[in-house]
Image: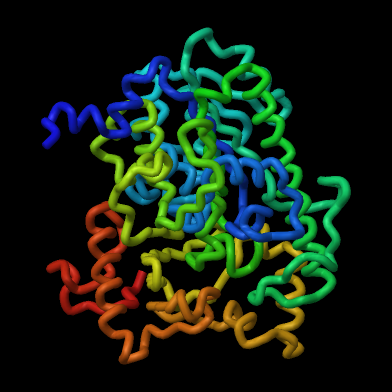
Amino acid sequence: MLSRRKLLQSTPAAALAQTSPPPNIVFLISDDHSVGDLGCYGNRVVTSPHLDRMAREGMRFTHGFVSSSQCSPNRASIFTGCTPHTVGMSRLHAPLPDWEPTVLDQLKERGYFTGIFRKHHQGAGFQQRLDFYGNAQAPFSQFFDALPKNRPFFLQLGFSDPHRPYQDGAFSPPHDPAAVTVPPFLPDTREVRKDLAHYHDFIARMDAECGQLFALLRERGLAGNTVVFMTGDNGMPFPRAKGTCYDIGLRTPLLAWWPGRIAPGTVNSDLIAHVDFAPTWLEIAGLKPAAKMQGKSFLPALLGKPYVPREAVFSERNWHDNFDPIRSVRTRTHKLILNAAPHFPYRPPSDLAASPSWEQMTKLVKSGGLSEEQRLVFTPTRAAIELYDLERDPHEFQNVADDPARRAVKAALMDRLADWMQATADYLPPASAKFDSFKGRAWPVSL
C-alpha cells in the first residue's frame, strides 16, 4: 500500500506542482455559441478548421454547460469558480466586485503573467487585476512580446463572435443559407436561413483568429508546455436559446489541447460545469483551489486518470434586459427547470428581439405558420416547474412535470436543486420544502 506521502505525490496536481516552469494556460471563449456549431461536433456546413484540428489533436467534451445563459454572469463564474448569485453577479453588465477573489489572483501568486485580449465583461476595474490587456485592435503577438522571460502565463482571448448584430462580409466565402440546418425550434424560412448563415460566418471568423493564436504558440516555441481550452460563454443568439435554461442555451463547445498530456482525438462525455474551469486551472498550476470555489477540477479527465465525475450541473438566469429568475439542474438523463416568475411570458433578450428570426416567428405565429413546438415561446405564461426526459426528448419540448410516473424523479431533482440553492447562498427560496424556512409553501412563490 502506498504511504500517504507517496499517494499525495502521485496525484495529478502534485506531479504538475513539480513542473518547472508550470504549464502555460490559454483560454479561448466565443460569444453566444451552442455546442453543435463546429465541424468537430458534427456541423458539416460551418467552416472551423482550426478548432476542428484542436479537437483532433486534443479532447472534445460533449457535455459542457455554462453556469448562466448570460454573458457577464457566466464569465464571472469562470473567473471565480462560483455560481453568479454567490458572487453578486446575477445582473448582466454588473462589474465583478473588487472583494471577490479570482483564479487570476492565485495564478499571479504562483508567478503567472496574466493577460486578456478583448472581451471579459467584468467591468473596467477588473483590468487592474491583469498584467496585460489588449483591446480589439491589438495584435495577439503584443502579449508574447510583453511576456517576461521564463514566466508561465495565463492568456484569455475573449472573442465577440458570433454575437449579434450580423451583416454581410464577416467571412469569405460566406456560408450558403440553403445549406444550413434549421433547428426544430425555428421556422424554416428564407430569412431564418440567412440569419443562421450569418451566425456561421461569424463562427468562421472567430475560428480563423484561433488559428492565429495556435500559429503564434508554435512560432514562439511555447506549444510544448501550454494547455489550451476553448468554450462558449452561452448558447446561440436565437429564440429559445440564449437567455434560457434549455440545453441549446446552456450547452456550449468545450475543447482542450495539451501536447504530450492529452491523448489526441479523445471524446469525453462527463458533465462539466463552467465553475469547474478555475479549480482545474489551479490544479494544472500545482495549486489548491480557494475554499470558496464551488467547482470541481476535471484535470484527471484531461490526463486520462480515474476520478468521480459530476452527477449534475446547475445553471441560472436572472436580470438580462428584463428580470426572469430561473434555476435548473441537469443530470445525464433529466432536466428540471424552476421558473420563479412563471406569470411572465418568454421574453427574448433585446438582440434576439431585433433579429430576423424573431421577426419571422412573430409574423408566423399570427398566421398559424409555426409548429406546435415553435409556438411554445408564445404562451402567455409558463409552467413553474418544467421536467424533461432528455433521452426521449433532447430538444426539451414535452414537459412531463405533471406525469405521475415521474413523481419520484421530479422530487429528487427538486431536492437536489434546493440543496444547491441553499449551499450557494441563492437569494431565491429553495426549490423544495425540505428546508424549515420553506415548509408548507409551494412554487410558484410570488416575487
- Residue 311, image x, y percentages: 31, 61
The residue lying at 30 percent from left, 41 percent from top is 293
Q: Is residue 65 visible?
A: no
Q: Residue at x 25, y 31 (%)?
A: 10
Q: Quadrant of the C terminus?
A: bottom left
| Front in this rendered view, residue 182 or 94 | 182
Q: Is residue 101 above or below residue 43?
A: above
As drawn, the residue found furthest toward the top would be 149
Task: Give the answer, above or below, for where 80 lies relative to 128.
Answer: below
> In the image, 317: left or right of 32?
left
Residue 300: x and y in percent read: 35, 42
Q: Residue at x 54, y 45 (%)?
A: 255
Indicate left or right for 53 with 60 as reference.
right
Please state, as top left, top right, bottom left or bottom right, where the N terminus lies in the image.
top left
Q: Is residue 346 left or right of residue 187?
A: left
User: Residue, x 50% and y 59% (percent of image)?
Assistant: 250
* Residue, far front: 1
Q: Where on the picture, by quarter, is residue 9?
A: top left
Question: Quick check: 110 above or below 402?
Answer: above
> Which x, y percent locates residue 127?
51, 26
Q: Residue 426: horizontal and vertical position, in percent?
A: 30, 56
Left-right relation of 103 to 41 = left
Visible in this render: residue 404?
yes
